[in-house]
Image (cartoon, helix red, strand yellow):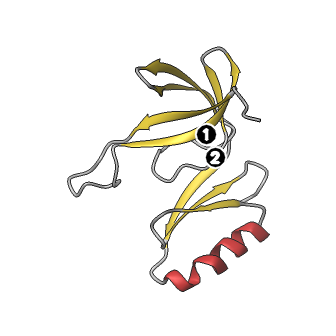
Amino acid sequence: MADDNYKKISFELEQDADGYPPDKWESLWAYETEPGLYSVDNIPFYVKGISSGDVVSAEREGEQLVFKKLVRPSLNSVFRLYLSDASKVQAARDQFRGLGCETELSNLPKLVAVEIPDKVDF
């Protein structure tokens, strides 16, 4: 059964002269907490200044729901790790998990997003 309150929000990305990040948009899952307000439910790879648990506002633009502003930050921090050796990615993820941090693996095999909850002292 699908949850009608679970939506994808599109965040526009600013690309540098080299075309990074590799797309102009990143979509994040979020729960609608009240009309027009959403609690982000996953770790971004490219969106800066947003982490899971943040409450954001978004508006429908055509077929997509587009981020407008950060309403209430969660106090979590997101870091991106680009490891030089793909064979060490899982060990790095395991170490962060052991410290109480969540991670997500990108479609780029050496890129990992790490979320450090506000309760973890780093």
Q: Which residue reaches farthest top?
A: 35
Label 2: which secondary element: loop
Locate the C terminus and report the quarter of the image it occupies.
bottom right
Image mark for residue 29:
1
- Across and down, in percent, residue 59 comes to 50, 19
Total labels drawn: 2
Give whichever of discs 1 and 2 has the lower sequence position.
1
Q: Which amino acid does label 2 sit on?
A: Asn
Residue 14 sits above or below residue 37 on the image: below
Q: Describe residue 80's horizontal placement relative to residue 7 as left or right.
A: left
Image mark for residue 42:
2
Image quarter of residue 33? top right
- Across and down, in percent, residue 16 comes to 26, 51
Alpha carbon distance from label 1 to label 2: 6 Å
Residue located 58% across and 77% down the image = 89
Residue located 77% across and 35% down the image = 1
Label 1: which secondary element: strand
Q: Which amino acid does label 1 sit on?
A: Trp
Q: Which sits in the foreground, 46 or 5?
A: 5
Image quarter of residue 74? top right
Residue located 51% across and 25% down the image = 69
Residue located 50% across and 81% down the image = 86
Image mark for residue 96:
none
Q: Which sits in the foreground, 97 or 104?
A: 104
Q: Describe residue 84's horizontal placement relative to residue 15 as left or right.
A: right
Q: Describe residue 107's horizontal placement relative to residue 103 as left or right.
A: left
Circles 1 and 2, Cβ within 8 Å, touching? The answer is yes
- Across and down, in percent, residue 48 comes to 47, 45
How crowded is the residue under tag 1: few (<14 C-alpha within 10 Å), some, or many (20+)?
Answer: some
- Across and down, in percent, residue 66 comes to 46, 27
